[in-house]
Image (tube, grey):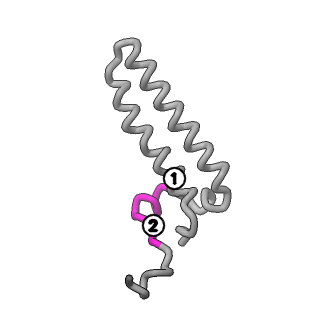
Amino acid sequence: MNTLTENAAPSRSRIAKILVRPFAYRHPRVCASAEGVIGLWLVTLGAGLCWHGYWWGASLWVVAALPFWISYQILQPSVRS
């Protein structure tokens, strides 16, 4: 067990520093909910496009991972710096 890093808060990744603004950390539940809704909308839109034969809609599922990841990052405790 390393006592030097035991109580240190993990630092945010460079992508999280760019994409997640300080406003999101001040209002985490609202922003995480909005990101979740955006992600669900992209998944639904991609499924609808695939259903109608537009297979490029499957790429929206990959894009939908970003809002879900952002909402996960916002709701992580003690990762604010």
Q: Amino acid at mark 1?
A: Tyr
Q: Is residue 37 above or below residue 32?
A: above
**Neighbours of disc 1 within 10 Å: few (<14), some (14-19), many (20+):** few
Q: CA distance from mark 2 to mark 1?
A: 12 Å
Which image quarter is the C terminus in? bottom right
Q: Secondary structure at mark 2?
A: loop
Q: Could you say where residue 59 lies in the image, as x and y percent from the top left? A: 34, 31
Left or right for 4, reference 34? left
Look at discs 2 and 1 and give the one toward the viewer. Answer: 1
Q: Is residue 73 above or below residue 43?
A: below
The residue sitting at the bottom extreme is 4
Left or right for 58, reference 10? left
Q: Could you say where residue 41 lies in the image, as x and y percent from the top left? A: 53, 31
Residue 12 badge: 2
Q: Is residue 49 above or below residue 73?
A: above
- Which numbered disc, 2 or 1, marks the residue that appears first in the sequence? 2
Q: Residue at x 61, y 61 (%)?
A: 25
Q: Residue at x 46, y 49 (%)?
A: 69
Q: Could you say where residue 49 lies in the image, as x and y percent from the top left? A: 41, 19
Which image quarter is the N terminus in? bottom left
Q: Could you say where residue 33 lies in the image, as x and y percent from the top left? A: 62, 44
Give the number of callouts.
Answer: 2
Q: Residue at x 57, y 65 (%)?
A: 77
Residue 72 badge: 1
Residue bounds of the magenta highlight: 10-19
The residue sitting at the front extreme is 1
Say whether residue 73 is magenta.
no
Q: Secondary structure at mark 1?
A: helix
Residue 12: image quadrant is bottom left
Q: Amino acid at mark 2?
A: Arg
